[in-house]
Image (spheres, rainbow, N blue to C red):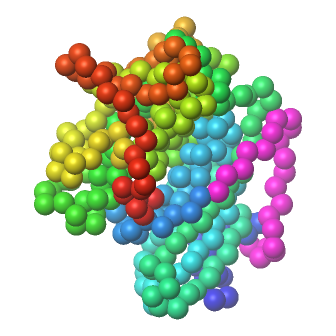
Amino acid sequence: MGELVRELFLEVFDDPELRRLDDLARLEPAAGGRLGFTTDCHVITPPIFPGGDIGRLAVCGTVNDLAVGGAEPQALSCGFVLEEGLELALLERIVRSMKAAAREAGVRIVAGDTKVVRRGEADRIYITTAGVGWIAAGTALGPERIRPGDRLLVSGPVGDHGAAVLDARGELSMEVGLDSDCRPLASLARALLAACGPGLRAMRDPTRGGLTAVLNEFARHCGCRLEVEEEAVPVREAVRGVCELLGLDPFDLPCEGVLLAVVDPAQAGQALEVLRSHPDGAHAQLIGEAGRAGEPEVVVRTPYGGQRLLDQPLGDPLPRIC
């Protein structure tokens, strides 16, 4: 195990704090502000999928949770559970992918741990990541700040990650040709926060449970009816095809490179312009608004003049998707 740590993890991640092989990493605090802290477990199958792998997913998922909470991501730790017999070439590919994603996101990997379990006690590889970031003084984001009239925006097409992973599992009888949208969102979130300031009410990345889960969470916290225009939500035709084949709703499929933002109506136009001017938000759309208070539900207006309630799915219809 020591040889694996020295010759793979230390060599690839190449961080001075990690090379100390101490029981903790020491980080310099930012002046003022608060500490943001988050953790994620990643058990996706298969570990390699179109557009990414479990390593890239682990880094991006944790970075994005920090970023949409208003934190500037700084450092990550990672814990690996490896099944006996895991191919070293696969592990090296995943570790190098993590390093590349961390470099792309502008974060350091400063601590980690590795455990090996007997064959059959795990499915090849699981990764847990934790991350810290600094939240500037005066930054306050959260769904409880949403008010009637606020506008809802998404930074790009929804459902790409879920559809790509289903394709990689061989569960479809069609060629999808779709990549996961797995990417770090720190730069995009930073630009939106800088442009909107206090007018940015809340952000979230719609991972497990997709757009449906985040919208319902926001509605519960703010106590408002959230109204979404179905035709305004960007969905690729390939994703629609997968959903029609499997009887799924595109809004329920997870994304790994999209954010949902809620902004003051006076700043909606500016927010949309900022998103679309960024390479990670080129296909951003205004998709709805917060309606009257007192009815915490999500309503989707259909293209035919009707409407439907967007309820939280029961259980986990797509297990091990992230």
Q: Main secondary structure of the magenta part?
A: loop
Q: Is residue 7 above or below residue 267?
A: below
- Which residue corresponds to the image point at 40% horizontal and 46% vertical from the top-left? 313
> Could you tell me which quadrant the N terminus lies in?
bottom right
Q: Is residue 278 visible?
A: no
> Could you tell me which quadrant the C terminus lies in?
bottom left
| Rendering quarter of residue 198 | top right
- Which residue corresponds to the image point at 46% horizontal and 23% vertical from the top-left? 226
- 107 or 287: nearer the viewer: 287
- Which residue corresponds to the image point at 22% horizontal and 64% vertical from the top-left? 171
Q: Is residue 317 above or below residue 8?
A: above
- Which residue corresponds to the image point at 51% horizontal and 22% vertical from the top-left? 295
Chain part drawn in magenta: 19-39
Q: Is residue 264 visible?
A: yes
**Residue 182 horizontal/vertical position (percent):** 43, 50
**Residue 66 horizontal/vertical position (percent):** 64, 44
83 to the left or right of 161: right
Q: Is residue 136 above or below residue 35?
A: above
* 228 in the magenta segment: no
